[in-house]
Structure formats: structure tokens, C-alpha cells
Amino acid sequence: MAGSEFDVVIVGGRCAGATLSTMLAQQGVKVCVVDKAGFPSETLSTCVFQSNGVDVLRRIGVLEEILAAGASVIRTATVTSTHQKFTVDLDPDTYGTLLGMRRTTMDAILIGHAARTGAEVRTQCPVEDVIIEDGRARGVRTRAGDIRARVVIGADGRSSTVARSVGAREYCTRPGGRVPTWSFYEGVDPGQGLFFGAVGGTRGGSTAFLGLPLDGQFLATVAVPAAEADGYLSDRYAGFDARLRLFPELAAAVEGATRVGPIRVLQKWHSYFRESAGPGWALVGDAGNFKDYSLGQGQSDAFRQAEYLAGRLVAGLAPGADLDSELADWWRWRDRDAWQLYWANCLLGEPYLPDSLADGLFGLAAADEAVALDFARIFNKSVTTLRAATTPTRLARIAPRVVRSQLAAPSGGLLGNARATAELARFTAKLLSQHPRSPWNRRHTPRAEGGLPVSGLS
């Protein structure tokens, strides 16, 4: 493998990397994708594929193979807060196609499709470092030899070797508020829908839930406040089953089913943005932006990001083009695209916010089918978070519900959770100040010689 040369080398061959390599190969770019894993193999995931990401799979010609392999098309969602609950119809003809599928199946299909499209695929090939020459990324070093390329793309997840090698710094970070635990089941009715929400009392933190059918299995997730994790994990099986009963519909879905394998746990994690473009390199997917799992956005964001980045790479690799300017454009687009749902995920991931906030919103959704569908459309990015909740009419209807819920709360609602409320307000202000269009954000606007972005990080 020594002396291999390509236009683009992509480190990481899962949702972001495999999809990007397929798109580049389809447009005649000489691309190599490498991954330390073999396929099929498991990876951390909600296993939810939002319709905006599924649309990308359709455009690259792999969706029919995914559906034929047994992906579940999810047609309903049951959403809960502590005192309110609603179910919404997710008709694929009006909402879009929402899928559930194990990553062992999905990732193997995606990397196989990339290879058939013309990308060179090298699995079980760990990357040790990025080759930097004259301040630019020029390829990667693997245990099997160097791979040279005009551009290095890091699609290698939270512990990105590419991000470490190029010194990509984090910004707008947020500690994980809950510790997710999850289990797979067999024997669940495949017609079950999506289950989502958080339940708790105002005296303590809320427990969050996610459940959905996959290809032949069912995934159930229970996420407890980080401060309660030690006690919960001391007997995770008893704790998991006990907490699951807080969401009766989800508990009923897996009643009588067989748990497959152990209960998995993710303890050490946080949300972040990373600097995601520089001289001859870029980051995509979780390598550049990781957020709370609550809205199940990671996989679909990876597909959408791959599609946009592919366009910038093709443009930047053309004769006479300014490649680094195109990569900088990619980074700015990623931040603009991610901002609102990053905020929403962090908001939903805070276990000590007052019940009155979610109860007010979900109570309105329970009473109004149009509002419920708008909330569901937040998941596929066809409606923004702020638009779904903050139209003048909806604010006028939500405010009395929030006030009533607050006054009825035994610990004082908003006041009883003042610390969490104040912390989220500070975090929101920080996000606003760092928005790509904010006059206070200097990360994307100043340019060094050659058109490279200046980070502006302190």
C-alpha cells in the first residue's frame, strides 16, 4: 500500500465516510476510505434514520437495498413528558420516511455500496496519524503504509485521529446531562412505532427514553441523570426495568420479549463542535459535531453533511479552484445547519429543567394535531425548533399551561429548578454569540493569507 495516491482519503467508513466516498466516486473523484473496523460491526448509535437523511440514501441509489434488508419504516411516534403525552401519525407520504435499523446492517450496506460505486475501501486498516507537510495535510499514515491525497477527511467519530492530528479544537461544549443505557430485544411486534420523551418529578432529575423497531429487533434506551448513575448502575438490569415502567407504553412494547446481549452503557461523553476545516483537511459527522442523543440526529446529519461536503470537494478539486475556501465554506454551512438542533438536544438532555416547560409544549401538542406534527417535523428538520414552539399564537396558548404547571409543582417549578434554568440560559447566550452570523463570532469571518479561516478561539 505504500505510495498509494488519491484525490481524497477518508478516515472512517460508516455513515459519513461511506456516504461521502460514494458521492465522490460517483462524480469521478479518486477516493480511498479506510476504517480500523471490519464490517459488519457494532457502533454507538440511536439506530434512528430521519427522513432528511433517508432522502440522501435515496439519491445515492442505496435505499432500496436498505429496505430489502429489513429496515423498519416507522409510522407513529408516542411522545411523553412527566404529565403530558401525545401520539402523532408519521405517514411517509406526508412526513417522509423514518427508518430504524441496526448499525451492523446499515454500515455494512453503505461501505459495500461505496466499493461497488468505485471507491477504494480498506477495512481493518487503523490510521496512526495525518501526514503534514508545509502546514498542509497531505495524506495519512497507516500500519500498512502511507496513503497520499490532496485532501484528508476525518469521518472517524468522537475520538477522531484526524482531529487530534491537525489540532482541531472544540467550542460550545456541553457536559452530558444523562447516562444512556440501552438494550436490544427480540420478539417485539415489528409494527411498534417510535417512543420518545422524559419523565420525572421536580424534586429530582428526569429519566429520558427512546425506543424503536429495527431490522428484526427492537431498541429500548433508558437515560438517567448523571448524578444518579452510580446507584442506577450498581444493578443496571433491575434499574433499567424499573425505570422503563415510568413510560408504560414503551414498557408494554417489550413486555414478554427476549433481551439480546448485555445492557450497554455510555458514561464518558459530552457535546461539542470542533473546528472542521483547515489546510487540506476537513471533519464530517461526529468527528466535527457531537450532540446529546435525544433527537436522534447523528446518522441523518452525517448523510446530509456528506452530501454538502461532497459538493464543496468536487468544486475545490477542479483546476484553478480554491480548495481551502471551499472547505471553509463547508465548515460555515455545517455550523449554520447544526445550531438550532444542537441547542434543542442540549435542552432536552438537561435532566433538571422544570416539568412545566415540556408539559406546556406537549399539552398543546396533545390537544392539537397540527402542533403535534410540527413538533415531529423538528426531527427531520423540515420545521425549526424555534418556529415549532414560538409562533405568537402558540406562545399565547402555551404560557398559561406553563404557569399552571409551575404553580402546581411541589418544589416550585421554574423557581425550584432555578439553577438548571439559569445554566441553560447562559449556554443559550453562548451559542447565540458563537452563531456563524453573530457579530460577536470571529471564528468564521476573519481570513488568513490564502483564504483559510482563523479560529478566534481563546
Image (cartoon, rainbow, N blue to C red):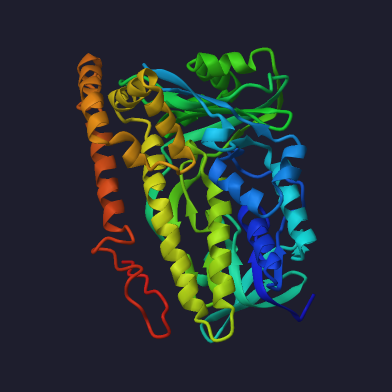
Q: Residue at x 77, y 38 (%)?
A: 68
Q: Residue at x 60, y 30 (%)?
A: 74
Q: Nearer the viewer, residue 307 or 334?
A: 307
Measured along the vertical axis of the image, is residue 41 above or below residue 182?
A: below
Q: Nearer the viewer, residue 349 or 304?
A: 304
Point out residue 231 in the picture as x, y percentages from the top left corner.
48, 25
Q: Nearer the viewer, residue 334 or 241?
A: 334
For the image, the number of numbered tags is 0
Q: Residue at x 37, y 70 (%)?
A: 455
Answer yes or no: is residue 275 visible. Answer: no
Point out residue 201 in the picture as x, y percentages from the top left corner.
35, 19
- Left or right? Give the position of 11 relative to 163: right
Measured along the vertical axis of the image, is residue 427 above or below residue 211?
A: below
Point out residue 47 in the picture as x, y percentages from the top left corner.
61, 38
Measured along the vertical axis of the image, is residue 117 above or below residue 221?
A: below
Q: Residue at x 29, y 47 (%)?
A: 427
Quadrant including the C terminus: bottom left
Quadrant including the N terminus: bottom right
Point out residue 63 in the picture as x, y percentages from the top left corner.
69, 45
- Left or right? Give the position of 195 relative to 26: left
Answer yes or no: is residue 117 visible. Answer: yes
